[in-house]
Amino acid sequence: MIEFPGFIELQQNGYLGVDFSDQSLTEEDFVKVSKKLLSKGIGAFVATIITSSEETYRRNLPLMARAIKSPELQGRVLGIHAEGPFLSSKPGAIGAHNPDWVKKPGIEFFKQMQEWAEGNIRILTLAAENEGAVELTKYAAENGVAVSLGHQMAGYEDMKRCAEAGATLLTHLGNGIPNEIDRHKNQICSGLACNGLTAMIITDGHHLPPELIKVIIRAKGLDNTLFVSDASPIAGMPPGKYFVLGNNAIIEENGLLHNPEKRCLVGSSATMFECANFLAAQDFITPEEVVQLGFANPLKAIGIAPEAFTAPCRVYWDEVKSKFICS
């Protein structure tokens, strides 16, 4: 029987209307929605703050750091994923982020962010082609931060340089890029070809078609692939119109969350648990392999031994229903 302490989410932007990047975030709301999320088959997660104003970082990072240390969340919220501000500001690559808040990669500002976060930043997403990306990658990696490349226009050589400097991940490979790309030289092919970079992919059924998920897993291998939900702050909410992450967005009846004006997705409306069951429904992967991609590999990506991780929630594979069940 397959049984384990829940899926591990490395990219959670909020939940049930609570936005971890919003200046109105309170510690009480952070704890409340985190506890709800952790009852949904999620063993632990990394809280994500996207590209934001300096004032938001100064306010929200200490707030999140305090909440992470609370008895209710200790060991279940494993740190912070800073998805920005060192991204590409170009249309397509920037996605739902605000280009006005993008910064050139800089060690000093990252040090300040980490100070505000009380050392809790575990993952940093940056664009590999930007001036200063290699230097920041080297500094962050040497200080125990997993550097991920994403929201970028980077080519193969850009990614290779950052990988050699210590980058180990690709943020939502296949997303955070322009809708139209070169047929050969593009961010997907370059990421697949670049050794040493584990691909994080969103398996909500909207961000990537199943055939591309299959290609990524085959190209990278099971040991170098993991999945995330990239759950939006309005994940768990009903279909409708919302203003989220600075976007006028719509959750369609089928769960697609997008900004029709910018022609971009705005994160996912699904949880990691739902993403796991979508992936498990495909004919090219076994339940055991889904557990590796959604439990063991995410923990390894942030330096935690899977065998050492425990959580009160239990998830198991139901052979009759052919799906994961949370108990």
Image: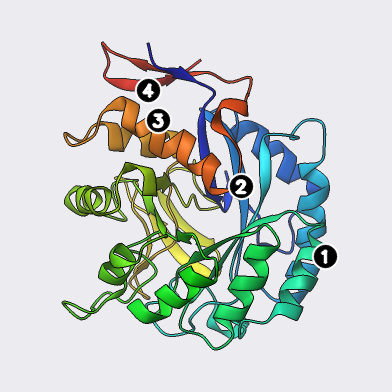
* Residue type of the residue flagged with mark 3: Val
**Dot 4: within a 10 Å radius of its alpha carbon, few (fewer than 14), some, or many (20 or more) residues?**
many
Q: Residue furthest front?
A: 164
* Residue type of the residue flagged with mark 1: Glu
Question: Residue 87: image x %, image y %?
Answer: 52, 77
Whole-angstrom CA distance, mark 3 to mark 1, is: 34 Å
Q: Residue at x 76, y 52 (%)?
A: 64
Residue 9 relative to residue 273: left or right:
right
**Dot 3: within a 10 Å radius of its alpha carbon, few (fewer than 14), some, or many (20 or more) residues?**
many
Q: Which mark is residue 213?
A: none
Whole-angstrom CA distance, mark 4 to mark 2, is: 21 Å
Whole-angstrom CA distance, mark 1 to mark 4, is: 39 Å
Q: Nearer the viewer, mark 2 or mark 3?
A: 3
Q: What secondary structure is found at the residue carrying circle 1? A: helix
Whole-angstrom CA distance, mark 4 to mark 3, is: 10 Å
Question: Mark 4 or mark 2, which has the lower sequence index?
Answer: 2
Q: Which mark is residue 291?
A: 3
Image quarter where the N terminus lies is top left
* Residue type of the residue flagged with mark 2: Val
Please say if the residues under marks 1 and 4 sit with CB atoms less than 8 Å apart.
no
Question: Mark 2 or mark 1, which has the lower sequence index?
Answer: 2
Q: Which mark is residue 324?
A: 4
* Residue type of the residue flagged with mark 4: Phe
Q: What secondary structure is found at the residue carrying circle 2? A: strand
Q: Residue at x 67, y 82 (%)?
A: 106
Q: Residue at x 63, y 24 (%)?
A: 311
Q: Which mark is residue 115?
A: 1
**Which quadrant of the view contains residue 60?**
bottom right
**Which quadrant of the view contains residue 132?**
bottom right
Question: Residue 154: image x %, image y %?
Answer: 39, 80
Residue under label 2: 46
